[in-house]
Amino acid sequence: MASLNAAAPDALSVLRRTFGHARFRGPQEEIVRQVTEGGDALVLMPTGGGKSLCYQVPALLRPGTGVVVSPLIALMQDQVAAMAQLGVRVAALNSSLDAGQARATERALVDGELDLLYVAPERLTTGRCLDLLGRSRLALFAIDEAHCVSQWGHDFRPEYLQLSVLHERFAGVPRVALTATADPQTRAEIISRLCLEDARIFLSSFDRPNIRYTIVDKLEARDQLLQFIRSEHPDEAGIVYCQSRRRVEETAVWLRSKGVRALAYHAGMDAAERSGNQSRFRDEDGIVMVATIAFGMGIDKPDVRFVAHLDLPRSIEGYYQETGRAGRDGEPADAWMAYGLTDVVQQRRFIDQSEASEEFKRISSAKLEALLGLCETAGCRRVRLLEYFGEGAAGCGNCDTCLNPPHTWDATEAAQKALSTIYRTGQRFGAGYLIDVLRGQTNERVERLGHQQLKVFGLGADIDERAWRALFRQLVALRLAEVDHEAYGALRLTEESRPVLKGEQRLHLRQVVDRERRGTQKRSSATTELGPGASARLFRLKTWRLEQARAQGVPAYVILHDRTLVELAQECPQDSAGLAAIGGLGVRKLERYGPMLLELLAQ
């Protein structure tokens, strides 16, 4: 196939002819110009913001091959399949190739027969691969998921540290580093470790306005999750994140028993089963994937309608990265999390018992504090989230605290009772037992220990158990109490609790509200607003797309995105000119699929 470079005199022409888009979004055009003209760039753009175009278009405009550093084989395979559909000469070099396939790809690179080459970082930095690149004409280097270079980040990959070699050996080749997640510290580390001090920085808004953020008090987490799925996203694709492999397996089985099409994914599974589940999630509609964070980067499925967390992530970066896999198509989506005291205790234990350096523990603790602040805030969640990334914002009107503003209360007296109970029982008990004492619950353990004789016994009978649990969680989150991991999760006082006990500091905390019973309004999307005729056409189009995807062995969204199918169903073009006006239909896809689509729409 001939290169598209010769037929692409400018960026907009490539965008229209190859990708089927009429215009660039946000800073894309400026980034494309910077890289095309030979400049380096650091691009921070939210998931779904169109980062890939920022290197794909320059690679087609500049002479030579664009080399893309990508951390996951599955991600490479999907990207290669998507670009091949567009008529781009593309290949990948990774461990999934046999020797013959690898040699053929290497020859194509040296002979100038590739527009794009995707390479894993550990392969790129080998002497053989670097020599191969040295004998080739290179258009650019694109370092995807660049936050992996940060040792303080949530996705650190040691092999990324070696990518500074690109600057040393190929100084004249422009480099663009891209990520969706980087706080100011991580950005500085990317610049330093990848030698991008002279690069132009493009910082887009981290806001994903189509995502609604909801964090609920954890009671019966699985029941709460099921209620959320049934009420908000029945028969829609979603991801449920859990901390442990066992919890993943149990949750997937339980959801299936309740009629949800749920699959499991974690690193301990048989490779064939894991790969098969990922393929089903990618290709079929309405699958819910229950996974550890091993199911992470490379999830390009655009129509994931929700991401749920049954366990607390380890940082805001992790939370943002994971929730960002919802709503990549720009349609309404949900980020839902159940959060409780056990999550705080578990995360503190991970950090305290880690064998990492004290510096790493300190930074991990600071990241956890920021995440707990997001969970406990009575203000807008989106404001707290964006502030973490150094971006100002006003109340969003599209998170649980904006839609159902929580009440705050003067919890000083209740906190004093709780802290006193921790102290008077010897700082040897967890929250459950302390609540029994506070509420005056007599049982065998209380009587055996004689704690019914304490002055604090029954002092909190006017507050229900759920409110006490929320209070203890907030005391731990605020570091007024801490968990003694050597004493099986017992709570003990911290130095910070002294001013509260002495009445020198007042506490105003978020009041527990049953948000799920109060409910939220289900939002409409472009799909739900279709009329009967367009809905029938959309069903036929999706059926056709699935057949094509299975026949070609590629994800359904590689054939055509949902947004393109919806526009086809709405507009129902009857000729080639009408098809060409639909977003996402470039020249190659019009040639390949145009006659089939017109026949389908004419039925």
Image (cartoon, helix red, strand yellow):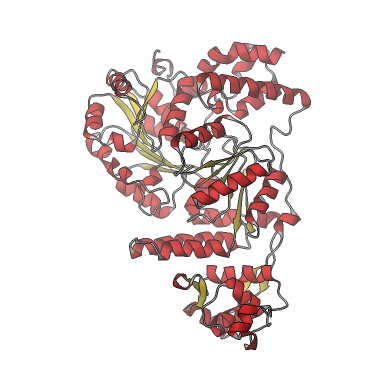
Image height of 110 relative to 246, above or below: above
Q: Is residue 295 visible?
A: yes
As drawn, is 302 to the left or to the right of 125?
right
Residue 180 placed where, x, y %? Answer: 47, 44
- Please give the name of the residue rendered at 52% of the width and 83% of the height, measured from the top-left corner: 426
- Please give the name of the residue rendered at 54% of the width and 76% of the height, measured from the top-left corner: 429
Image height of 523 relative to 453, above or below: above
As drawn, is 97 to the left or to the right of 246?
left
Please state which of residues 328 and 418 is positioned toward the viewer in this rendering.
418
Residue 336 placed where, x, y %? Answer: 62, 50
As drawn, is 471 to the left or to the right of 1?
right
Image height of 593 relative to 481, above or below: above
Residue 91 placed where, x, y %? Answer: 38, 24
Q: Is residue 207 visible?
A: no
Residue, far right: 532
Q: Quadrant of the N terminus?
A: top left
Residue 598 placed where, x, y %? Answer: 65, 13
Please state which of residues 40 and 105 is positioned toward the viewer in this rendering.
105
